[in-house]
Image: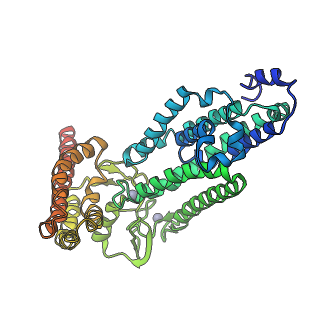
């Protein structure tokens, strides 16, 4: 990248070599440098939003109330560039809007995350070229002669964005593993906070470049550290099996390597982590593990969104045994009266009772079934249920009748997802029988 293809600003560099040096040029390129380094953290979060807001600030920044005071913005004004053209702004604007929308849906978010490590560094690189081309000036000429600008893009921005994107994806992966459908809504909340943080971060980067550089550095560093800690904690939580010495989750009922029984399995928490308290009993523990998307035998994480499926560690076929499936469904069914009572109490509180009510029934009654359904089936059910729910929510504000709304929503969802998973498992079982016979 740095050597063979000519840099976009090379042509202008030759033309402008005779230009007299001035202070404006230096200011412009401090912007390119600070923006390049400072936005690494922002690109790893929202690449298109960062690119779009950068281009907008460069084009219109001087007309905005606070930003116009920034020396950088004033100096960028009037610099003609492909990066700040109407065409680029329109395309980036559309892509940024799509990026914001896409990150609000758990399924779409998971799908696009696979491409993030390639897309985000590329957009960061192109944006840096765009900023450089708009701030093309003497400083770049000098810097380019030393290869400074090219080095910055190639060896700092691109790998920096790549690295932070991986760290962020891994961290968010832990959240979505624990709560794939975002039943609690925390992932959506974080997603909105990120949107605001990225846009605000860029504006502040222009206004207080050095302070923001430090702040973005601290946030990015924390992200990497938290990710590393979470990873090692997961591994450290394993203990050697008493029979064969291989690592085993404390919450496992048996060792994945030698199948020896775990003499004292530990209970598991909401996020699927092993707790210090003893497990409730082998059956209850097995149901609880499956509910948390873990193997009911060795407690390994299950990766696929389908059932039945094979455990990646011990090979146990999860949710294939009809007696186990019946027990699993009955275990969830036993919560229905309690959950409905709580939902009725919450539902009688107009408007604000709705959100905790919905979270409780989704986590307790719906998620145990929905976690094992493939994408198409989930979308279909969502559509069917949505129409009924929409009508119900319209009446939730009515003081007395409102109390029935959340319990009704819970019953509709519970019945629909329970029925759909039972059907899915039954057709899988008959397929197995057909192929055997
Ligand atoms: Zn063992
Ligand atoms: Zn297993």
Image coordinates for residue 434, horizontal then vertical, percent:
18, 39
Tell me if residue 220 can be seen: yes
Image-based side of 353 in relation to 230, left or right: left
* Residue 304 against residue 342 in the figure, above or below: above
> How many labels, in total?
0
Image-based side of 274 in relation to 355, left or right: right
Q: Residue at x 66, y 27 (%)?
A: 80
Image-based side of 61 in relation to 182, left or right: right
Which residue occupies the foreground of this view, 340 or 202? 202
Pick the quarter of the image with the N terminus: top right
Image-based side of 109 in relation to 73, left or right: left
* Residue 363 against residue 262 in the figure, above or below: above
Q: Residue at x 16, y 57 (%)?
A: 392
- State ligand 2's quadrant: bottom left
Tell me if residue 38 can be seen: no
Q: Quadrant of residue 71?
A: top right
Image coordinates for residue 22, horizontal then vertical, percent:
84, 36
Image coordinates for residue 155, horizontal then vertical, percent:
73, 40
Q: Residue at x 46, y 66 (%)?
A: 249
Q: Residue at x 39, y 66 (%)?
A: 254
């Amino acid at each position: 990248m740095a050597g063979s293809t000519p840099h976009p600003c090379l042509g202008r560099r030759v033309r402008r070599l005779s230009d007299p040096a001035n202070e404006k040029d230096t200011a412009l390129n401090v912007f390119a440098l600070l923006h390049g380094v400072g936005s690494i953290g922002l690109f790893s979060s929202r690449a298109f939003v960062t690119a779009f807001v950068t281009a907008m600030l460069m084009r219109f920044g001087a007309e905005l109330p606070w930003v116009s005071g920034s020396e950088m913005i004033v100096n960028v004004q009037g610099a003609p560039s492909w990066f700040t053209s109407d065409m680029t702004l329109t395309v980036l604007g559309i892509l940024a809007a799509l990026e914001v929308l896409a990150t609000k849906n758990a399924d779409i978010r998971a799908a696009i995350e696979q491409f993030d490590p390639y897309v985000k560094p590329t957009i960061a690189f192109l944006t840096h070229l765009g900023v450089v081309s708009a701030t093309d000036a003497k400083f770049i000429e000098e810097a380019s002669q030393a290869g400074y600008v090219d080095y910055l893009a190639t060896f700092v921005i691109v790998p920096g964005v790549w690295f932070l994107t991986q760290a962020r994806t891994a961290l968010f992966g832990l959240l979505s593993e624990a709560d794939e459908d975002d039943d609690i809504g925390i992932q959506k909340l974080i997603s909105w906070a990120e949107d605001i943080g990225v846009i605000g971060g860029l504006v502040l980067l222009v206004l207080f470049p050095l302070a923001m550089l430090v702040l973005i550095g601290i946030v990015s560093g924390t992200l990497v550290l938290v990710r590393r800690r979470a990873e090692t904690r997961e591994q450290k939580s394993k203990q050697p099996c008493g029979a064969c010495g291989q690592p085993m989750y404390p919450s496992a009922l048996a060792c994945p390597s030698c199948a020896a029984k775990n003499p004292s399995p530990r209970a598991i928490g909401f996020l699927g982590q092993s707790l210090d308290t003893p497990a409730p009993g082998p059956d209850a523990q097995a149901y609880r593990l499956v509910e948390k998307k873990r193997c009911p035998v060795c407690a390994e994480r299950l990766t696929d969104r389908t059932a039945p499926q094979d455990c990646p560690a011990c090979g146990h076929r999860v949710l294939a045994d009809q007696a186990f499936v019946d027990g699993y469904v009955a275990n969830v069914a036993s919560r229905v009266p309690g959950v409905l009572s709580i939902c009725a109490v919450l539902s009688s509180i107009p408007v604000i009772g709705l959100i905790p009510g919905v979270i409780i029934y989704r986590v307790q009654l719906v998620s145990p079934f929905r976690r094992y359904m493939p994408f198409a089936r989930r979308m279909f059910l969502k559509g069917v249920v949505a129409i009924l729910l929409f009508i119900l929510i319209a009446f939730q504000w009515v003081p007395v009748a409102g109390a029935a709304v959340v319990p009704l929503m819970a019953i509709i969802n519970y019945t629909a997802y329970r029925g759909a998973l039972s059907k899915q498992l039954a057709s899988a079982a008959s397929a197995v029988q057909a192929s055997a016979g």
